Amino acid sequence: MKMVKNTGDAAVLIVFCVFIISVFTSMILGIGVYQNIIDASRQGKEERIGMSYIWTKIKSGEASGEISIGDFHGISALCIDEEYEGQRNRTAIYNYDGWIYELFFRAEDEFQPEDGVPVIRNQSLKFDQMANGLLSVSVGNETMMIYPRASIIAMGGGIQDE
């Protein structure tokens, strides 16, 4: 009779150990899922901030300058050329070392990508000049089409008035 009692105790102990292992496994898997959700949320937020920043720079440069896409040291850059006190200046916005950089300099001067100021962390930034002056800006998975000096913006597939 004593042997049956020990077997029962062993069975309870085995069930308890399986339960504890299941709880820890669920916690570890839950932590991984939670981290993936946080990472996706952070990436989406950084993309939206990057798009907003670039859109604002383009819209602020429209009144006083010329907006174009340039190539600097193999890096695609948004260029806003403006005249200050008789001198031609340029603001370049580009992706370098995982960041969106901004650099303000005299248009005739050369710069190195590391000379700019890192503004927003981002892994992907792409500019394209399209027909009729349309600019395509891609930040991560988001794409925005802008007609400089116009009041229509197409973002994420839809068209909205400013």
Image (spheres, rainbow, N blue to C red):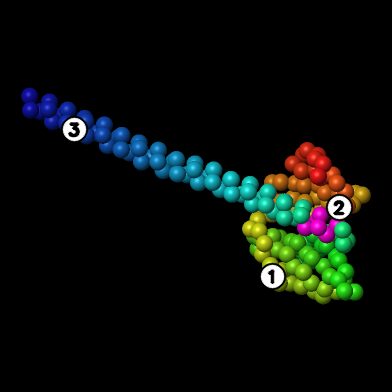
Instruction: Look at the magenta stretch and give its main secondary structure.
Output: helix
Circle 3 — which element? helix
The residue shown at (79%, 65%) is 91
Q: Nearer the viewer, mark 1 or mark 3?
A: 1
Relative to 19, is 73 above or below?
Answer: below
Amino acid type for the residue under numbered disc 3: Ala
Residue positioned 54% across, 43% down in the render: 37
**Residue ID for mark 2:** 148
Q: Which residue is mark 3?
A: 10
Question: In the current view of this chain or complex, which residue is farthest to the top?
Answer: 1
Q: Quadrant of the N terminus?
A: top left
The span picked out in magenta is 57-62
Q: Quadrant of residue 125?
A: bottom right
Q: Nearer the viewer, residue 84 or 111?
A: 84
Q: Quadrant of residue 123?
A: bottom right
Viewer-side residue, 74 vs 122: 122
Crowd class of label 2 (few under 14; some 14 to 19; many from 20; radius 10 Å):
many
| Label 1 vs 3, first from the N-terminus | 3
| Badge 1: residue crowd in 10 Å (few <14, some 14–19, many ≥20) | few
